[in-house]
Image: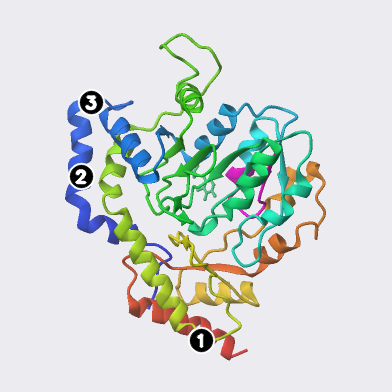
């Protein structure tokens, strides 16, 4: 039985009428750019995350770029982040001419290891950008403590973590700015590219809102050079419908995750590690195994969806050769990139499908 990594058709079917009506409404009012759905979505996301403001932008990548611009990241600055993330995290830093400084991860959560951050701080460090990988928050208290001590800004890359919590606080409401992606496969996914920035700071809000419209306020008067990074009204309309279901979907994913935790019996397979004070939204359910590439091939030939997030840490990417990181310099990230594999997880996944995934994996290892 084939099992998809993600099946968005199963999500669409029960809410098809609501989505289609929301899209038709946009065609009827014709405000395709910055229509009423955009400001309504900003209000709802700010409420959901618990921040004073939310600024809708064209993608998660743009959210990171604009957030970094808003805190005045420039050539010569250093921003501390994790190498074990999607490329956009590092790319946004380098696109502003700044230098990403990579700090290794905690091997059990795959998030930046706060114990290693202080040694990476220099006179040029301006910000720390933790990533809440796979939908689980980074260990924020020590990160926020270091930011206070050294007067650094904190930008949360919460692209995979809308609704995720850490000691009762929401992802995107702990740093100076939070950045979200609504890429279609994220827990809250648009019908194309979409993103959001959250903040409690009046000044940063004003800056982000200007930067997304070419730095203009009022229209045609440019205090700074910004971007064209508005969120399409149609995307906001789709997201408003889906937002109503998001908490239920998180619970669905969490139930699937605990099924996997229960069904896996081989102790050579490391299932995700989550402390009690974290609310993990399981954007991914990621296990750690031996012979990962063998398993990847085996799952492929059995038509079971899986993916490696991410096979090459950022510090070893070709485009970052100039930074001079050697192989072995960030050992936990390098080890994780060879051992992790993410399995099908979405609210509509059936228990039969989960059984199939686990049996296929365990048979592969028993035959070895
Ligand atoms: C998805 C993602 C992004 C980028 O978001 P887009 O909307 O695809 O531009 C950035 N960081 C992380 C960790 C992501 O997972």
Of the image marks 2 and 1, the number of the one nearer the N terminus? 2
Query: How many badges with numbers are in the image?
Result: 3
Residue 233 lies in quadrant: top left
For discs 3 and 1, the disc positioned in front in the rendered view: 1
Cα distance, mark 3 to mark 1?
Answer: 55 Å
Circle 1 packing at 10 Å, graded few (<14), some (14-19), many (20+), is few
The stretch in magenta equals: 79-90
Kindly state the secondary structure of the residue where label 3 is placed. Answer: loop
Residue 335 placement (x, y as % from top left): 70, 66
Q: What residue is drawn where x is 33% and y is 26%?
A: 34
Circle 2 packing at 10 Å, graded few (<14), some (14-19), many (20+), is few
**Seen in the image, is 50 located left or right of residue 153?**
left
Q: What residue is drawn where x is 46% and y is 84%?
A: 359
Residue 92 placement (x, y as % from top left): 61, 37
Q: Which residue is mark 2?
A: 20
Q: What residue is drawn where x is 50% and y is 18%?
A: 215
Is 41 magenta? The answer is no
Q: Are marks 3 and 1 in contact (CB under 8 Å)?
A: no
Q: Which mark is residue 148?
A: none
Kindly state the secondary structure of the residue where label 1 is placed. Answer: loop
Q: Which residue is mark 3?
A: 30
Q: Which residue is mark 1?
A: 265
Placement of 8 over or under 77, stated as above or below:
below
Placement of 29 over or under 281, stated as above or below:
above
**Seen in the image, is 91 located left or right of residue 332?**
left
Residue 177 placement (x, y as % from top left): 52, 37
Cα distance, mark 2 to mark 1?
Answer: 43 Å
């Amino acid at each position: 039985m084939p099992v998809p990594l993600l099946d968005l058709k199963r999500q669409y079917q029960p809410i098809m009428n609501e989505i289609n009506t929301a899209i038709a409404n946009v065609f009827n009012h014709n405000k395709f750019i910055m229509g009423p759905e955009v400001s309504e979505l900003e209000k709802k996301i700010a409420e959901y995350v618990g921040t004073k403001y939310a600024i809708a932008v064209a993608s998660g990548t743009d959210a990171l770029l604009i957030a970094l611009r808003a805190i005045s990241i420039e050539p010569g600055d250093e921003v501390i982040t994790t190498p074990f993330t999607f490329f956009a995290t590092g790319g946004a830093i380098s696109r502003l001419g700044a230098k990403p400084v990579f700090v290794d991860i905690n091997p059990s959560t795959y998030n930046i290891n706060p114990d290693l951050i202080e040694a990476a701080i220099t006179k040029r460090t301006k910000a720390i950008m933790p990533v809440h990988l796979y939908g689980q928050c980074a260990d924020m208290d020590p990160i926020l403590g270091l930011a206070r001590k050294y007067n650094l800004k904190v930008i949360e890359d919460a692209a995979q973590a809308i609704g995720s919590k850490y000691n009762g606080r929401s992802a995107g409401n702990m740093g100076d700015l939070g950045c979200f992606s609504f890429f279609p496969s994220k827990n809250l996914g648009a019908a194309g590219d979409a993103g959001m920035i959250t903040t409690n700071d009046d000044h940063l809000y004003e800056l982000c809102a200007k930067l997304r419209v070419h730095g203009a306020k009022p229209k045609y008067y440019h205090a700074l050079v910004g971007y064209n990074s508005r969120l399409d009204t149609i995307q906001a309309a789709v997201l408003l419908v889906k937002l109503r279901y998001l908490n239920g979907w998180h619970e669905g994913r969490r139930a699937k995750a605990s099924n996997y935790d229960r069904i896996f019996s081989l102790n050579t397979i490391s299932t995700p590690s989550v402390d009690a004070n974290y609310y993990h939204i399981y954007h991914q359910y990621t296990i750690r195994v031996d012979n990962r590439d063998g398993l990847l091939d085996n799952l492929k030939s059995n038509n079971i969806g899986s993916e490696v997030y991410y096979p090459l840490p950022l510090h070893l990417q070709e485009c970052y050769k100039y930074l001079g990181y050697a192989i072995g310099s960030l050992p936990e990230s390098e080890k994780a990139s060879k051992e992790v594999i993410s399995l099908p997880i979405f609210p509509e996944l059936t228990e039969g499908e989960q059984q199939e995934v686990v049996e296929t994996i365990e048979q592969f290892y028993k035959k070895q």
